[in-house]
Image (cartoon, helix red, strand yellow):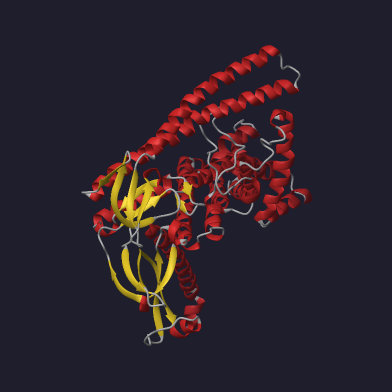
């Protein structure tokens, strides 16, 4: 036994076991997040319950089961619930999503198994996904088309035709609003700022006034035409209505322009449910958020996260590499260089919120405010760069991740033998040529390693972004078809902040919970995708410059 311990085998097994346990824990966490998030898009079975309340009155309830738990009978009795017969030590309680928010008030309610008279799954119940007020559950009865009530013979196919028509018209209206109408509004704002700039410079002549007024009049005429077309599309989408019978037995009229999808969940087979699940995931990834971010998709947050991280990488890489090259190749060893290295290492341990405060004070207020006074005085007092935006977020995270890139690059430079440098210089190359053609290519895998670590940290940061650019909802992306096409001064959405907002600021906690898991899994997927891309580039560079090491 003593020899076995001296051989070091126990420590190998111990470290291997620790790594295995850590790996299993990480994979288990990811699987739990994925299951809780992705199962949200699986079409649930819809039940209709016949219930009896405490006063002995019966009523109907339609919805889907969200959660189940066992509650001690003593706890329910102390809360004032009276049982006709003893249910035992505990009672099963169901969390039911009932929808129909405008009539019920809350989307969810708890029901006790002892209050249930009967439960069944009618095939005629439909789940109506809407743009506002959440889902609606009920039995579709008829469609009102051009003011005329049409009874639904083949309910599912006939209703889907009307819904697809309204959705297509709404999509066309939104596309018109974001593209052509948005471009006209952007051009009108530019003309207003141009006139203001001429006025501040004392160059606003009558000729320039007339020229700007003529351009504005032309744009206004085009705007009126597009506005008429836009409202025409909206009116056509709202032309028809759906009549549906809810759980109260009352016929309710829903405008088709507010309906996104109609699903008869109880009629779907396994293959249809799989197709519905893929459609739901696709919408979640590609749509804009709705209902205070508790419904819809997260595409603006995905775009904002990736765009900000890529911009940060473009900024931090050259600065980090140049700083590392100077410290390792040019700076003389002494107390000042040692202090700089200590400072760089200490910067890696500074809390991220401190970087956010620094970014707000230096980049936004000082640097951005100065840019506004020098280059955008016509827009003041409304700030252009003097308010939080994606460029300041990228710069703040670049400073936050700069120590990681510097340290990683220095380690890569220190692993290159000095004989390589001396051989290059002996062959007549200058020090700059040696660095550019030999040293940097050989150190590029280490540079990519630093970039991978920087991306992994920056993509998950939230605290500093809350101060320097991220918002709850950003209707316009920082990239569009209006010159200069990339608008770095705009605010943006971020997956990390979206998780915080949905999880802790949502007015509907139960509805938001699955979206927290789904968005968390999506954020992890984005980070993994960015890292895998960087790792692939690093491996390619390592193979490309492997010959230089020999």
- Camera-side residue of 156 and 412: 156
Residue plotted at (64% across, 31% down): 430
> Is any part of residue 67 visible from this angle?
yes
Q: Give how far across and how far down residue 255 sits, in percent.
A: 38, 45
Q: Seen in the image, is 155 located left or right of residue 172?
A: left
Q: Give how far across and how far down residue 1 sits, in percent.
A: 47, 83
Q: Give how far across and how far down residue 371 sits, in percent.
A: 71, 33
**Above-or-below relation of 16 to 344:** below
- Camera-side residue of 147 and 111: 147
Q: Residue furthest right?
A: 335
Q: Residue furthest left?
A: 153
Residue plotted at (69% across, 42% down): 364
Q: Seen in the image, is 494 located left or right of residue 525?
A: right
Q: Which image quadrant is residue 373 in?
A: top right
Q: Give how far across and how far down residue 117 sits, in percent.
A: 31, 75
Residue plotted at (27% across, 60% down): 266
- Camera-side residue of 480 and 326: 480
Q: Seen in the image, is 185 located left or right of residue 1?
A: right
Q: Which image quadrant is residue 440 in?
A: top right
**Above-or-below relation of 222 to 451:** above
**Above-or-below relation of 173 to 464:** above
């Amino acid at each position: 036994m003593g020899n076995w311990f001296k051989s070091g085998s126990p420590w190998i097994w111990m470290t291997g076991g620790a790594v295995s346990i850590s790996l299993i824990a990480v994979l288990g966490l990811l699987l739990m997040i994925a299951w809780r998030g992705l199962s949200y898009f699986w079409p649930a079975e819809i039940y209709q319950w016949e219930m009896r309340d405490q006063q002995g009155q019966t009523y109907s309830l339609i919805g889907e089961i969200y959660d189940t738990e066992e509650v001690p009978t003593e706890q329910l009795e102390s809360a004032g619930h009276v049982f006709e017969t003893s249910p035992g030590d505990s009672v099963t309680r169901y969390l039911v999503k009932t929808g129909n928010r405008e009539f019920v008030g809350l989307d969810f309610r708890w029901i006790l198994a002892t209050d249930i008279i009967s439960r069944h799954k009618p095939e005629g119940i439909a789940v109506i996904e809407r743009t506002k007020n959440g889902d609606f559950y009920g039995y579709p009865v008829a469609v009102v088309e051009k003011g005329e009530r049409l009874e639904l013979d083949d309910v599912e196919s006939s209703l889907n035709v009307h819904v697809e028509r309204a959705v297509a018209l709404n999509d066309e209206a939104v596309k018109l609003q974001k593209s052509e109408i948005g471009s006209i509004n952007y051009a009108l704002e530019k003309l207003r700022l141009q006139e203001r700039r001429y006025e501040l410079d004392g160059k606003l002549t009558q000729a320039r006034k007339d020229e700007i007024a003529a351009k504005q009049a032309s744009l206004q005429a085009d705007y009126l035409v597009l506005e008429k077309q836009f409202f025409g599309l909206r009116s056509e989408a709202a032309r028809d209505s759906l009549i549906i019978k809810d759980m109260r037995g009352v016929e309710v009229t829903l405008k088709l322009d507010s309906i996104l999808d109609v699903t008869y969940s109880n009629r779907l087979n396994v293959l249809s449910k799989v197709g519905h699940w893929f459609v739901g995931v696709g919408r979640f990834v590609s749509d804009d958020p709705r209902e205070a971010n508790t419904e819809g998709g997260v595409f603006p947050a995905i775009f904002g996260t990736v765009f900000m991280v890529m911009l940060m990488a473009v900024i931090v890489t050259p600065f980090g590499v140049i700083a590392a090259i100077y410290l390792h190749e040019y700076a003389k060893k002494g107390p000042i260089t040692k202090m700089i290295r200590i400072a760089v290492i200490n910067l890696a341990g500074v809390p991220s919120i401190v970087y956010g405060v620094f970014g707000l004070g230096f980049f936004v207020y000082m640097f951005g405010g100065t840019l506004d006074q020098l280059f955008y005085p016509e827009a003041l007092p409304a700030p252009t760069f003097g308010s939080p935006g994606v460029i300041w977020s990228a710069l703040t995270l670049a400073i936050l991740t700069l120590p990681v890139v510097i340290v990683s690059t220095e380690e890569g430079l220190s692993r290159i033998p000095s004989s390589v440098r001396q051989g290059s210089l002996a062959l007549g190359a200058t020090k700059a040529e040696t660095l550019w053609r030999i040293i940097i290519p050989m150190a590029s895998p280490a540079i990519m390693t630093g970039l991978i670590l920087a991306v992994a940290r920056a993509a998950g940061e939230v605290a500093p972004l809350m101060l320097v650019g991220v918002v709850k909802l950003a209707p316009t992306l920082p990239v569009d078809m209006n010159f200069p096409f990339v608008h770095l001064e705009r605010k943006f959405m971020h997956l990390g902040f979206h998780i915080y907002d949905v999880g802790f600021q949502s007015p509907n906690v139960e509805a938001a919970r699955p979206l927290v898991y789904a968005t968390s899994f999506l954020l992890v997927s984005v980070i993994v995708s960015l890292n895998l891309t960087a790792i692939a580039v690093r491996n390619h560079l390592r193979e490309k410059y492997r010959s230089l090491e020999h």
